[in-house]
Image: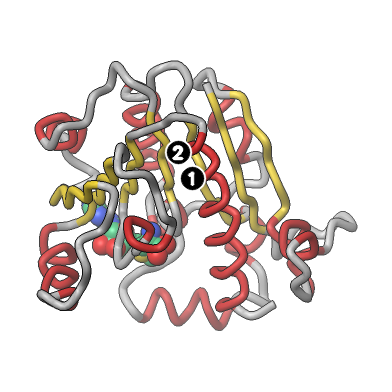
Amino acid sequence: MDSGDVIGVRTRFEDDRVRAAADAGITQIVLPAAGMDTRAWRLGLPARCTVFELDRPALLELKAGLLGTAAPVPVPRRVPVPVDLTADWPADLRAAGFDPGRPACWVVEGLVQYLPEPAVHELLDAVTALSAPGSHLIIDVVGAGLLASARARPILDAMTAAGSPWLFGTDDPGALLTARGWDCEVHLLGAVAVALGREAGSVARDDGRDDDRGYLVHATR
Ligand SMILES: C[S@@+](CC[C@H](N)C(=O)[O-])C[C@H]1O[C@@H](n2cnc3c(N)ncnc32)[C@H](O)[C@@H]1O
């Protein structure tokens, strides 16, 4: 699988779970580090839902410019929330209308590999503190071995050269969440790819090698 397929598989995994959470009655969908995410338009979410898109102010301004006036207004309410995820972003999220007394569905997609480990723990602490019973947290995590993998060296070097080095990986992603009181399903990304009918390539390998794994996690509490 090339990196495009990896992103496609993780997106589909996360999309399916967001839709299921919304169908089950969750109305707050929160996307920390939303980037150019288009789930507010793509997923056909009910009008009762609000999609909170958190990212840096400059990114959200760029996105607004690209969307321009041509993009249709999404059916769920879409609320861009300019934040620095290393500062007091929970206050900004609450000020934007998020209610920590009601369950939420969080999608932490394509983010934690870019953070130093202490920042990953702070982020998960903050998400957990804002998650009422009944909440969902969907997150993708790269394996620790991948960060030192010769096979991954080209992409790791390219990310470093682009100013976005990959810093965090773990082969026990469930522990990050069970320690915070979440129940977890942890899936090997390659196994999800196979289940979706994609050619898995080496990321599906579960033969004891740990140099190229990625994980998709769905946690509930
Ligand atoms: C690789 S992109 C992932 C975007 C999207 N979740 C996806 O998977 O397509 C990482 C995003 O994290 C955002 N980001 C990184 N550090 C951040 C910070 N400290 N505060 C807010 N956003 C941050 C970047 O602006 C970028 O949009």
- Element type where label 2 sits in the image: helix
- Residue in front for this viewpoint, 194 or 110: 194
The 10 Å Cα crowd at callout 2, few under 14, some 14 to 19, many 20 or more, is many
Q: Residue at x 11, y 58 (%)?
A: 57
Which residue position holds label 2? 22
Q: Residue at x 31, y 73 (%)?
A: 163
Looking at the image, residue 55 lies above or below residue 135? below
Identify the amino acid type marked 2.
Answer: Ala
Q: Quadrant of residue 65?
A: bottom left
Q: Position of residue 42 (x, y in %)?
A: 40, 63
Left or right placement of residue 52 versus residue 201 in this view = left
Which residue position holds label 1? 18
- Residue in front for this viewpoint, 204 or 98: 98
CB atoms of marks 2 and 1 within 8 Å? yes
Q: Quadrant of residue 179?
A: top right
Identify the amino acid type marked 1.
Answer: Val
Ligand 1 lies in quarter: bottom left
Left or right placement of residue 68 versus residue 50 in this view = left
Q: Position of residue 15 (x, y in %)?
A: 51, 54
Left or right placement of residue 174 versus residue 127 in this view = right
Between marks 2 and 1 in the image, the one whose residue lies nearer the viewer: 2
Q: How many marks?
A: 2
In the picture, the disc for residue 164 is none
- Element type where label 1 sits in the image: helix
Looking at the image, residue 206 lies above or below residue 165? above
